[in-house]
Amino acid sequence: MSSAATLAARSARVSDSALAAALVCWLAVVAAAMVGLWRYKTAPGPVSPSPARWPAESRLDRTEGRPALVMFVLPMCPCTRASLCQLNAVVPRFEGRVDAHVVFALPEGVVEEWRRGGSWDQAASIPGVRVHADPGEREARLFGAKTSGYVVLYDRGDRLSFSGGITASRGHEGDNPGADALAALLGGERAQLVSWPVFGCPLENPR
Amino acid sequence: MRRLDEDSEPAGTPAGATVAVKAERLFNEQRLSVYRRRDRVFSWLMLAQWASGILLAIVCSPYAWAGKTHAIHAHVWYAVVLGGALSVPIIVLARLRPAAALTRHAIAVAQMLWSALLIHLTGGRIETHFHVFGSLAFLAFYRDWKVLITATVVVAGDHLVRGLLLPESVYGIVNPEWWRFLEHAFWVVFEDIVLVMGIVENVREMKTLAGRQADLEEANATVEERVALRTRDLAASREQYRTLIESTKAIPCEMEASSLRFAYVGPQAPRLLGYAAETWLRPGFFGDRLHADDRGKTLEHFGQVGELDVDKDMEFRMVRDDGEVAWVRSIVSKSEDGSKLRGMLFDVTERRQIEFELHQAQKLESVGRLAAGIAHEINTPIQFVNDSIHFVRDAVRDLSGLIDKMRVVRDSVLSGAPSASAAKEAVAAEEDADLPYLVENLPKALDRSLDGLDRVATIVRSMKEFAYPDQKEMASVDLNQAIRSTLTIARNEYKYVADLEADLGEIPSVTCLAGDVNQAVLNIVVNAAHAIGDVVKGTDRKGRITVRTRVDGDFVVISIQDTGTGIPEGIRDRIFDPFFTTKEVGRGTGQGLAIARSVVVEKHGGELTFQSELGKGTTFFIRLPVQGAEQKALEGAAT
């Protein structure tokens, strides 16, 4: 083999090796990015304790002797759609046996258009659910809601029986322990869980 | 048909091995072409998926909110960064290493990671898993089953890892059954099996097609090689033919039948007339360069070529650029569609000159052959003229002596002294001179001398008339007189074997070349004498030659009849051929009748025919147009 051919073969081997190394690096970067995405989607929103009993200051209607369920959502949060889908998967099964509310948190100073976002209609279309606007996030503060998608369930005795999210991760539809626990409680069963992380945007402005 | 996986050719067959190698090469070329095309398509797909991911993120989750504040949603950043990380390196790789195995396997990995990402982003929606199946089908277009293995490993690994760590992102639920991974893997493997079967079949067809194409290319190459070989042979043959044609003196030519304009002349043409080949191609060249005397009949001839009874062969004169005349012989025929005349032109000037000289030589030969007879014919009158002159001279001398004696007597008487002796001497001288005899015979001697001289003058005049050496153009001629002259100088040829009867009728003057006609008549008369000589040889008998002239319409007919041997049937077709003779060597050259025919037919447009009966004799008929050949041709054209 001539020296030129030898050089070319060696150059090709080096080039192939470099390429393989680059591909490995590429896979590592992609894997890292996937992990980062996974961590972002599974990072829960902030929570705070909700009142153990139905707050008397609440302006939400409730029927005596019925469980009451309230979901707090931020209209502009992309994750709201998944939370409402999950709510739609649970509540209609118990229509007439639970007072279900979806409260749209409207921070101070937001324009009226927030209320009329796409999520409003989605929520209003869920059977047995009443939709409310919460200007200044008064109700959210009463119930200790910090993250969009936060759900509280009070039983017939006004006791808090469940709080947290009903999605598996950010914007993630599908079966998950939170939704399963909520359905079980509404069905009068004992639930192993009384809370589940909530995945969504913070309801309040950052401090 | 030959397939790569079928060894249909006998082992070691060079042609089979060549085709197999070619088929392998074609298959590999086709496969690389497929790889390149797929790489290119996947490059665009990667770009499209990246753009779609970004667009989807912007539409569905443009911002992340905190109260009423917002920021670009992490999904957008991930779509840009992670999508770019998945797509851009692959696009670059496909550009740098198209058709490389590493490239398509990297593409398979990236495409499956796109599926994983989309499934991840859609929360494990079962519908999004169709992206996996679609991607596998798309990858199958590479027609390389190993790519599917790579893709399957990636998708299985993703399902396994995420199924263990984050099941809801791949299955959509948080607590899937333990065998859910196997269920997904089963369907992927199921599709893999179907796709691999398709790929194997597809590759087999590609190999079959490559084999067919190799066969075709081999056959095509063989045919092309043969065609090239034949083309070379044909070109060489054409070149050889062209060289052969154009290197001879014969000039190949083609002319338009309607206008007689040359469309092509061989490169020898300039040598014929001195004009460049391009000049020959000009309209009207042919007609313009024809000799004025030949133009009419030549154009008429060329206009009728291809018709029945029109010879392809003709000789005519053309005028060279230096004014000299060139004799040209043409042999042309009409093309099948009648639009072209094609043939050859020959420069026969030299031959014509030789023929002319031969003709003249033949004349001289005739004169030479006749010279002895003519000398004899002249010698006889000269002899008796000589005798008569001698007689006259002696008589004059005797008379002169007598006159002297008589003058002496006269002087003696005038002097008054007459001398008897003088008178006696005068009487004696008178007796010696035989004066009565002289008075009676002197006029006769002078008459014989005049007659002899007249006969000599006739022979000399006949010789002069026979030759007509200065006549080059046709002229009006008293043909009977010309025949008489010819018979005069030929007399010695026939007078010992035949009696001649000249039955020359009333005929008009004929426009002709008298010298040539005389030559023709002489040749036939001499032949007649020879034929009669063969009959009367060794006997005292004489034959008879009868020469007649008659008018027949616009023609004058000269018939020369002999009582010779006659012409045998077997040679009648050949007697006009040059150099054909039945005579012994030294008696004839075979040119006589050939020249006679040339003179009568070609020069005068007449006819030379004969009737012959073996053992009884032959009669030749010379038909000459009274107005000459040119006038006859013009009248023929007019009718």
Image (cartoon, rainbow, N blue to C red):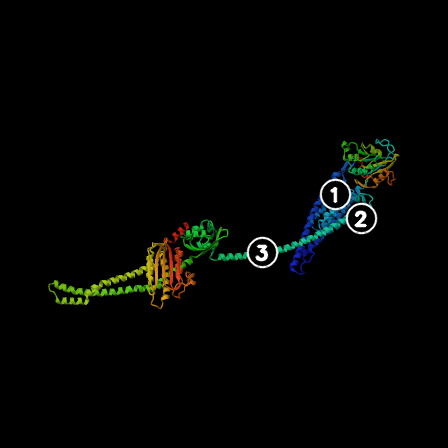
> Callout 3: few (<14), some (14-19), or many (20+) C-alpha neighbours within 10 Å?
few
Does residue B470 appear in this view?
no
Q: Which residue appears farthest toward the bottom when viewing the image?
A: B538
User: Which of the chains bears the disc numbered 1?
Assistant: B
Does residue A161 appear in this view?
yes
Q: Mark 1 or mark 3, which has the lower sequence index? A: 1
In which quadrant will I find the C terminus of chain A?
top right
The label on residue B81 is 1
The span from disc 2 to disc 3 (Cα, nearest Å) is: 65 Å
Location of mark 3 (residue): B228
The label on residue B182 is 2
Q: Mark 2 or mark 3, which has the lower sequence index? A: 2
The total of numbered circles placed on residues is: 3
Secondary structure of residue under mark 2: helix
Residue A45 placement, left or right of B525:
right
User: Which of the chains bears the disc numbered 2?
Assistant: B
Camera-side residue of A105 and B133: B133
User: Which of the chains bears the disc numbered 3?
Assistant: B
